[in-house]
Amino acid sequence: MDDDLFLNISTDTSSVVSKKTNSKSTGGKWKERRKAQLSNRGINKPKKENISSANSTAVTKKAPLEKKPEDSTSKDNQVIKSKHLYPAENRKKRPADDENEARGPNKQSRLVEGKGVPGKNNTFVSSLFTSNSEVTARDYDNEMEVHAPSNAPLADSTTFSGLGMNEIINKQLTEHMKLTNPTKIQRSVLPRLLTRERDLFVQAQTGSGKTLAFVLPIFQKLMEVESLNRTTGIFALILAPTRELATQIYSVLETLTRCCHRIVPGIVIGGEKKKSEKARLRKGVNILVATPGRLADHIENTERLDLSNVRFVVLDEGDKLMELGFEETITKIVKDIDSTSRISTTTKLYPTLPKRRINVLCSATIKGNAKKLGEISLVDAEIITASSVPDVEDLEIIENVAAPDQLLQQVCVTPPKLRLVTLASILKNIVKVQTEGSRTMIFLSCSDSVDFHFQAFSKDGKKLNKATNEFDEESDQQSTVLSSPLLGEGVIIYKLHGSLSQQTRTATLSSFTKAPASQHTIMFCTDVASRGLDLPYISTVIEYDPPFATEDHLHRIGRTARAGKSGRSVLFLLPTEEKYLDLIEHYHPNGVQHVSYEELLKTGFGKKWDFDATTWHLDVERWLLEDQSAHDLAARAFTSHIRAYATHLSSERDVFNVKSLHLGHLAKAFGLRETPKKLGINSGSTSSKKKKENPKDVMFRKARNAAKAQSDEFNFM
Ligand SMILES: Nc1ncnc2c1ncn2[C@@H]1O[C@H](COP(=O)(O)OP(=O)(O)OP(=O)(O)O)[C@@H](O)[C@H]1O
């Protein structure tokens, strides 16, 4: 197998066992393990984090330990390295030399040592690498234990019909949708919703098939109503936090209607024309999928919306609904349904339907906000997890929120100025290694950053013609789907964020979903795509920026390794953010694989990785120098990124502290040469010169900024 392939697909358990025995770093906190591993390699962690010394090699929970040739943290060594590795007379010409030559002899040596040189107009040209350290090849394939999928369909004799699904639905599932066995959560939920009249609080892993778990029984119950047609009324209501998720649930319902045309699903979500939604509601639907805000709007303003027959209410991604502030809206919707309900008077008319309203709440967690939503919307609910046995009622409740077992979680601690080249290298490597095609999602902190990275990677790209699936001759930077000459022929780049119109969002997602599996597709997105989206064949998720809430980490990485498939996820962290691993450790009981950015750079850029990465980066910098609009885009992305960074939860301030950012180096990762001051950013260190702001004003200003950032970025409704 190619050395460059990171996916862990070894099945040789004997080697795994022996690796495990060799491992000296299991148990305890990750920090203690890391400390032990570093000291085993003779590397003492410096007291104060030094960005240039963060070039640590990989540390893996269960990885065999390798001895690093030199102590790269020693200051003396760094100087010696610089001198020995780039002796002026015999070293090859490096790309940065072009810049040096323009600057004269005194400044050249500074650039070689990686300190950077001041340029004109407040610009600052720093080199990417302080030295070209040796990279020892690692056997990634064999160092992590391979785990059986935890969200796959059951491999035993359990069938959908055995769980009570009727023949027609069973045929639709097995013959048309090619789903032969239910998943664990479906095994627990289907019989309960079909035979009992009790509310459910469903908690299961990402990609475990929750949607069909609640949709199938509702669909079957409606099929049993002989008199049902589109004018009979709305019998089920499904609420989802994002428009994309609502659309996806609606399309699952549409697929099912192929086996029963009488049942009509409908959808009302923000961003669509209200008039056409009203017309749809007037014509009549039986199962309504909605985002809460838009539904509340229709309850107020659409006379023909009649929820008096609703027998099933499903709240999908409950914790996210609460996080987005829908508590009041949902409380109002539930009250409205209660107050208008005619269930008691229509029981005889629909004898096969439940005699009371059944509420189902799906959530990644059953604690905190989600628990509160349960109190608002559920009555005497049974808690169902994947481990719930179908016919046992009172279960011991175990909060089992973890990433799918088969997912390979990698972590790369990257110095700020090397972020962009490391990302480029990962993408290059994916295209090189996954010859059969690949799908990658890259999560960023804000829309502006998505726009910049999309444009940087699709520079000179051609627009995809949706009708012909061919690329147009002309480049069109307004498009959200472009080819990427930079990454290679046939690579398509997408972007998705909340500031795009709903129409564009829907079209982009649909194009991404329908792209042939043989192509390489890469989506740059914000958290608008982190929840519930079931995009086929996602092989890699890259968290280029860590999320704003730890649960979102679980949901982002959950876009891969779905329904038993394998998947890889890479989390980028700055050296100052390593403590973040403490916060997400519980999501990864099987450990995480630490990958050094040098190794990642080598896999994508090849043997002369430092030379080629520098050339690649200089190209980006030149592009910004030559193209003012691209420069403005990068500057906007950088400033928005810093602003977004400042909105990390105060409880995570010791991990994500804007004051600990090296703004100059971070700007470099946006291809910028300006000093942060020139870009209008300061880290707070110069604030003492200003008049001290009243603490109350600070609080209000931050709250206003956070609210503004939310409405720009997370335009969910
Ligand atoms: N029984 C099954 N066998 C095989 N695949 C299935 C089965 N049930 C669902 N799937 C597929 O699994 C994928 C994930 O399903 P779904 O989107 O419902 O997951 P989920 O649990 O809601 O995930 P998330 O928490 O991320 O929203 C879908 O592509 C779906 O078609």
Image (tube, grey):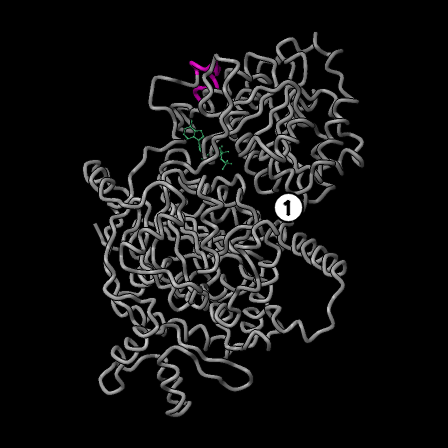
Helix, strand or loop: magenta stretch: helix
Q: Is residue 392 magenta?
A: no
The image quadrant that residue 315 belongs to is top right
State whether residue 574 appears in this view: yes
Location of residue 46 in the rendering, given as x and y in whole percent from the top left corner: 39, 63
Element type at mark 1: loop
Q: Position of residue 604 (x, y in %)?
A: 32, 61
Determine the image quadrant of residue 149.
Answer: top left
Give whichever of 366, 196 is nearer the camera.
366
Q: Which residues are magenta?
A: 161-171
Looking at the picture, does residue 386 appear above or below residue 665?
A: above
Residue 393 horizontal side relative to residue 241, left or right: left
- Residue 64 coordinates in the image, percent (x, y): 24, 48
Q: Residue at x 60, y 18 (%)?
A: 222
Q: Nearer the viewer, residue 423 or 518?
A: 423
Q: What x and y, as percent, mark residue 307?
A: 73, 25
User: Which residue is located at x 71 percent, y 20 percent?
Assistant: 309
Residue type, numbered disc 1: Phe
442 sits to left or right of 328: left
Name the foreground residue: 506 vs 242: 242
Taking 584 as reference, is 352 above or below it?
A: above
Q: Considering only vertical position in the picture, is 536 above or below 358? A: below
Q: Decide: is 256 above or below 96.
A: above
Magenta-drawn stretch contains 167? yes
**Which residue position holds label 1?**
716
